[in-house]
Image (cartoon, helix red, strand yellow):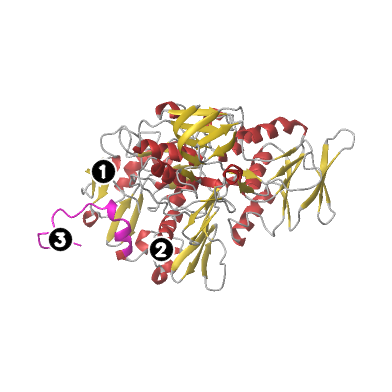
Amino acid sequence: MPMKRVLVNEPVCMGCHLCEVYCQLNHSTSSDLVKAFKRPEHQNLPRLRIEARNPIFFSLRCQHCAEAPCISACLTGALSRDEKSGAVITDEAKCIGCWTCILACPYGAIKQDTVKHKSVKCDLCQGSKIPACVEHCPNEALVFEEVAEVKSK
Amino acid sequence: MNRTKYLIIGNSAGGIGAVEAIRRVDKAGAITIISEEPYAAYSRPLISEHLFENRPVANMLFRSPDFYVKNNVQTILGKKVTGLDLKAKTAQLEDGASMKWEKLLLATGGQPIIPKMDGVKTPGVFTFTTIDDAEAIDRFLPRVQRAVIIGGGLIGISVTDALVKRGIDVTIVEMKDRVLNVMLDEAASALVEDALKKNNVRIITGRTVTEIHSDFTTEILTGVTLDNGQELTAEMVVAAVGVKPRVELAMAAGIKTNRGIVVDRAMQTSTADVYACGDAAEVYDFIFGDNRVTPIWPNAFVGGGVAGANMAGKKSEYAGGMSMNSIKYFGLSIASAGMVTPPDAAYEVISQTTGRNYRKLILKDGIITGMVFTGNIESAGIICGLMKDKVNVEAFKRALISDNFSFLSLPEIVWRERLEITFKKPAAMSGAGVRQ
């Protein structure tokens, strides 16, 4: 199934971390930037990781692989594919934080929320037209584009 | 006689993986699942949660409740298959019914090994692999203060975690010199033992239970004797010494079995149109380069998927799996894959410890054959990816165990290749100055 994915235009990424900031905000239970970062009850991890080794920067997130190894590895069925968007999404109620998906992901794109004991990953900002990271990238270093099926490594 | 195109015996990871793969190819062919368990497919690891927080079965389901309806699967649950006729392509059920099939999948799983010893049939001796096991333990708990767990493997640790949370005083008796000795190395086992001790769990290693006692008149379980004569008082015993592949159906039908049901890379058994997967089968392991029993959930699911595709006529080959485990009990975060200890001197071991984080790799000729990580394990999947693709890491192996390892710790040619799909392709290659 062709789907839209976030791609990195690495040559123009300057490592400003705004994608990370807006990812965290969009996944916070508060829409207030300060609360999203400073109030533990509103804090949720950003679902991407910044790779930086001057002068190379880029942000890395779930690739929503066609044959997603994390879905195959998930012990509880918490990970599944959203039929509409094609995104690989997590049902937090079902996730028990066993971290098996982390072992399965060749991109290291799944994070451990050690407070809630849940795996967290990019959900392409379900419900939004454009993922927050793409929307707020000041340099068009992130684009949201239709791509062919992704075969994972 | 009932007929089905696809018959799947077993309703867990392998069986569900097969259904999903069959339906990707064949939307209409009749699928029937027979399982002796009366439940919709549930996540077996969640029986621990079922026991300690009474998580309802509805919240343990591996797939949505409408899975069978949506995929047009007929289920026969709570019934046992008692025999197979491979020539006639039929399966006999315990109630006398029989089912004719065109393609068969044996996803029969494993069964707990019950050690042979006096008193093993005493009420109060349990195993811990099914919902019914967890419920039987739950019903028995009101009369339990102390429990002895025979075996410090994953099942032993998971039942210990649940029992500790229920306020039970637990002693683990492990035959080898440390708990989780199959899936962890010494350093990681020591971490688990520390966590167990902090939770007041007593660990006795290097010992086995030789006898389970009960009161002569009331038959109430009173304790166990160890092989050194030591006695432990307990009201409950959980036998968690291991699981063995359920091969009896296959064996009786004349299908080739070894420790598990023997399959090829298409997951087909020695008999055409009969497939096997999961804990019941011996499947290809790319670390050891041979077929073996690796009873882990993800491999069962993937193997079931390969079997299902082939059953539906789409050629598919099992790429091979490896042992892969992670520990979440007692708030720990530990991951291991492949070998956890080097089999001989030809292997190299490198490791690094920084505070809570421990990273160990086992390598041979520059290829990673095993890993154990504790603490922050978020990059464990990148390592597993390098293992799967047999990437030679000789030149940068030290970077892999560094605490701040990331993709950019790898040589540029390696990370660019591995992350190719995440980058936007340069617009056109014709113009000058396009950066490669």
Image quadrant holding the C terminus of chain B, namely bottom left
Q: Residues within 10 Å of mark 3 (few under 14, many from 20)?
A: few
Q: Which mark is residue B434?
A: 3
How many marks on residues? 3
Q: Give the CA separation, mark 3 to mark 2.
A: 32 Å
Please identify the dominant SS of the magenta region: loop
Label 2 sits on what residue type? Lys
User: Which residue: 48% across, 54% down?
Assistant: B377
* Residue extent of the magenta highlight: B414-436
Q: In the displayed orientation, state which residue is furthest to the right.
A: B217
Q: Which mark is residue B390?
A: 2
Q: Is residue B356 above or below residue B134?
A: below
Image location (x, y in percent) of residue B178: 67, 58
Q: Is residue A101 left or right of residue B77?
A: left
**Is residue B66 a member of the stretch shown in magenta?**
no
> Which of the 4 quarters of the picture holds residue B379?
bottom left
Q: Nearer the viewer, mark 3 or mark 1?
A: 3
Image location (x, y in percent) of residue B86: 52, 41
* Label 1 chain ID: A
Give the labeled residue for mark 1.
A134
Label 3 sits on what residue type? Val
Look at the numbered disc 3 and give the secondary structure of its residue.
loop
User: Which residue: 21% across, 49% down?
Assistant: A139
> Which of the 4 quarters of the picture holds residue B381?
bottom left
**Is residue B417 a member of the stretch shown in magenta?**
yes
Q: Nearer the viewer, residue B317 or A153?
A: B317
